[in-house]
Image (cartoon, rainbow, N blue to C red):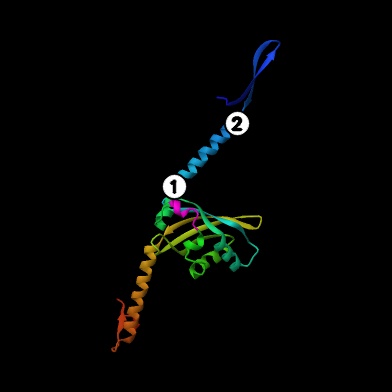
Amino acid sequence: ILNGLMSAELILLGDVPHILAVIHDITERKQIENALRASEERYQAFISQSFEAIYRTEFDHPIDTSLPVETQIDLIYENAYMAECNQALADMYNLPSAKIVGMRLIDAHGGKDNSINRAAFRKFIQSGYKSFNDETMEYGGTGRPVWFLSNTVGIVEGGFLVRMWGISLNITERKKAEIQLRNSEQKYQLLFDTMGKGVVYQNADGHITSAN
């Protein structure tokens, strides 16, 4: 099948009207357009159906990678916004996806001074603008903290960070369990240390494992 683009005009040859038609073969161009459309459809299907949160972050102004690390982090917070995301990320934030797109990173992170989040960006920059298994604490539609475990890849062009791609999992329940376990261990240790009587714990082999 060939695809053509035709233009025509009425001309006179002597006194007899004729139609002059010119046809350009655009088969290759249509094949490229169809391939691009199919690729875009596969991309959108992959993004939308993934159980992992996938997102793209853009900047109002690219980040100069020659600047000090802390300055770069400040500039990331000043310029970064969510440009694209799938439904999985919207669910993690407990917000409609339409409200996620355009959201400022500084708002999602509850400001730019959270030491956990800054540490994640510090690792990202110092690792060549890519990092894996970073924990960040963010804020969703309920206003409660949401813990993310993320892999992030930055796109650097001409010495400037121009965008970031990320994949995240919601680890909030795991973090809650870790905090509860830590609090429980601290209470136990406090009770153990302040008991008036001596307490000794032994394992099955008779070895002492702890004592107050």
Mark closer to the chain start, 2 or 1: 2
Q: Residue at x 54, y 34 (%)?
A: 34
Magenta residues span 97-103
Question: Which element is circle 2 on?
Answer: helix
Q: Is residue 176 left or right of residue 2?
A: left
The residue where tag 2 is placed is 28
- Residue 7, percent from left and from top: 63, 24
Residue drawn at x 42%, y 54% is 90
Q: Which x, y percent locates residue 84?
A: 50, 51
Q: Residues within 10 Å of mark 2 (few under 14, many from 20)?
A: few
Can residue 174 be seen by looking at this rendering? Answer: yes
Find residue 126 and name its label. Answer: none
Q: Magenta stretch containing residue 102, yes or no?
A: yes
Q: Amino acid at mark 1?
A: Ser
Depth check: 56 or 6 in front? 6
**Gap in Å between the C-alphas at discs 2 and 1?**
30 Å
- Name the residue at the left extreme: 197
Quadrant containing the N terminus in the rendered view: top right
Residue at (51% x, 41% y) in the render: 40
Return the residue at label 1. 48
Does 25 sit above or below residue 85?
A: above
Neighbourhood count class around disc 1 (C-alpha, 10 Å): few under 14, some 14–19, many 20 upward = some
Residue 143 placement: quadrant: bottom left
Find residue 185 and report its image quarter: bottom left
Note whether residue 212 is visible: no
Q: Position of residue 142 (x, y in %)?
A: 38, 61
Quarter of the image that includes the C terminus: bottom left
> Which of the 4 image quadrants contains residue 183?
bottom left
Q: Position of residue 32 (x, y in %)?
A: 58, 35
Residue 161 forms part of the magenta stretch: no
Above or below residue 25? Residue 197 is below
Q: Tell which residue pokes out farthest to the right in this image.
A: 14
